[in-house]
Amino acid sequence: MSVDSHHESRLHSESKKSASLPDPQEPESGHSERLSEKDSRSTAASNAELAPNGKYFRDLIRLIQCKICNKPLQQPLALPCGETLCRNCLPPAHERQNISYPDQPGRRQGFACPFKLCEGQEHSLADCNLDITLTNILTQLDNVLSPNLPPDPLGLSKYFTTNLDARAEVKEPQARVSVLLSGYNLAQNGDLPFDSGFPQHTIPDGSLTSKTSDGPLLTTLLAATRSEFDCQVCYCLYNSPITTSCGHTFCESCLERIRDHSNLCPFCRRPLSSYRNIITGKSNRRLTDLLSLMYPDAISARKTQISEDMPEGEPTVPIFACAMTFPRMPMFLHIFEPRYRQMIRKAITNGTRCFGMVTHRQGEAPIADGDFDAPFNRYGTMLYITNVQMFPDGRSLIETIGTYRFKISSYSWKDGYPIAKIERVEDIPYGDEESMEATERTLNPSSGDNPENLACLSTQELHQNCLNFVSLMRNNSVGWFTDRILNIYGHPPQDPALFPFWMATLLPINEQEKYLVLVSTSVRERLKLIMVWIKAMEQKRW
Amino acid sequence: MALPKRIIKETERLVAEPVPGIQAVPHEDNLRYFDVAIHGPTQSPYEGGVFKLELFLPEDYPMTPPKIRFLTKIYHPNIDRLANWSPALQIRTILLSIQALLGAPNPDDPLANDVAQRWKEDEPGAIATAREWTKTHATP
Ligand SMILES: [Zn+2]
Ligand SMILES: [Zn+2]
Ligand SMILES: [Zn+2]
Ligand SMILES: [Zn+2]
């Protein structure tokens, strides 16, 4: 099917009035009452008839300014640390050394992050993509403001109060100065440093409440940008917007739901990569701040609605302590105990179709579990029920697929089985994965006398060595990788992140060893664990 | 649980700006159920026919696709082969794609059914059957 859906024009329910500025020569009409700073700010977005003060506009302009060039962002790139800069303000790129995973176009090009938070840390160019939502907002904003800027830049002087003693002028009809327009113009010319306020002699901070120009302009602006802040999955205002490495933005909760079903962006179908790598699991700061500045009422209504939709307290998931399983791997279960029959029936009827699978604890608690004290282990895999076959006597056969890994934060018992509050277990960001590889390989340039030294191998080589072992075993008709098994579990994944889960599902290794793979949040570390198993098996065989 | 905003908005839009040749009406007692009627595109073997479908939005829509079932019998090689679902798609786009498939049947779809086989071997015959079925089953 080739119907292109998301490029259809969207319905804009908000009216798009064109902004108009009053003639600067026209005398001030009788609106002279001034709002207190607090009042004006809190009603700014809900009732734009009343224009907010200079600080409001300074904050607004700052949120669209680049910290590097001070101008309104041009082709804003979202960085993995949550910062934003213009494409042209990117520092020069260099070739990164000793990294092999993830082997994606652009990942080998890197630059030192210019922002304070990162202290010169390297980012991969591939992690910095055009922030599509912010780009659309900037375009809408410019469409509203630009036509109202005076044609001749010098003409702007009319809009400024050049009198240095601004306070004395406050009662005078200077209110037709458009703070928003003059601020935008200053920023465009690069004359408004990111950290400074509006220059005192041009716009007296906090003293202007110009109803005649800024009010209608702001109303138009808010209407024009409003639909850009809607998540295209839930059609509601963004709630904790997260920008993915492909540049698309989703509510955090929507992104989590997407990832329960697919690893691809719904819009561009590029891999969503590791969740934490998606702006390191941090909300898009610019979008979050713009939202709370521009639509404070709508955002608080949204938060209220979300908390009302949420069931009492934190959500819990049912836990089934049975067998070791991994993300993306199918598992077939025969459900006969009444308590688990009830658990499965509930999962089907409430529509979640999910439950958490953990293993029974055997002997000592694994180190990863800390002080977690339960008859089962702390880490497990969320299973999604893909198929159910019910028998007349109440037993059932279910087919499931592993979705994500989780860690139990707390649990209690209900109807004979545990219910738990959980946190997702996500892999470390790509950037950390790469620096781990680079450090190990720099310290271990070659295997030297020790062929057991895995640290000198690139992550891709580790994966390749494992794949070679699988082919060798297949050629030797070793029972773990028969066609029948591969029909069920698929061929060895080409994705180094998933490969260890496949291998751990198929190899006859004890559960304590497999648990190390389950809890590991580094692809490289997981591959090394598998390599250790392989070496041990090879030694036994020869 | 309350109906998600997304479903409300999609429904509002389907009603306010209907797709030409497609009617989709939600059930009054279950707003996740739609009665759909698609008019066969002109110059296709389905011209003149009105095809009735039911469309259901599952609990985890839009994470999982709408469930669709043809109520009217139809002779078509790959009408049951809908695109890879993504939450970026909508009810509207799914219905449009069904309409497009009526206009351009594709028997080369690798997962098509036995109608596809006949379509490949004897296209004029298959088209004639599709016309006949349209007349018998889909003409009001
Ligand atoms: Zn810049
Ligand atoms: Zn940074
Ligand atoms: Zn959303
Ligand atoms: Zn995308």
Image (cartoon, coloured by chain):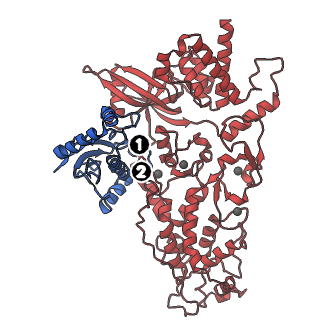
Q: Is residue A180 visible?
A: yes
Displayed quadrant of residue A152:
bottom right
The span from disc 1 to disc 2 (Cα, nearest Å) is 9 Å
Q: Is residue A122 above or below residue A336?
A: below
Residue A136, percent across and down? 55, 62
The residue nearer to you, when weighing A385 against A94, is A94
Circles 1 and 2 in contact, beta carbons < 8 Å: yes
Chain A display color: red
| Residue picked out by circle 1 | B83
Amino acid type, mark 1: Ala
Q: Residues within 10 Å of mark 1 (few under 14, many from 20)?
A: some
Residue A510, percent across and down? 57, 14
Left of A163 or right of it: where is A476? left
Chain B display color: blue
Left of B85 or right of it: where is A133? right
Instruction: Give the residue at x 59% y 18%.
Output: A512
Q: Is residue A86 above or below residue A333?
A: below
Q: Which mark is residue A241?
A: none
Does the Cβ of the disc 1 residue fall within 8 Å of ligand 4? no
The residue nearer to you, when weighing A304 against A299, is A299
Does the Cβ of the disc 2 residue fall within 8 Å of ligand 4? no
**Placement of the N terminus of chain A among the 4 image quadrants:** top left
Instruction: Give the residue at x 49% y 26%.
Output: A329
Q: Is residue B35 visible?
A: no
Q: Which mark is residue A3?
A: 2
Left of A373 or right of it: where is B24? left
Q: Look at the numbered disc 1 and give the secondary structure of its residue.
A: loop
Amino acid type, mark 2: Val
Q: Look at the numbered disc 2 and give the secondary structure of its residue.
A: loop
Q: What subunit carries mark 2?
A: A
Displayed quadrant of residue B84:
top left
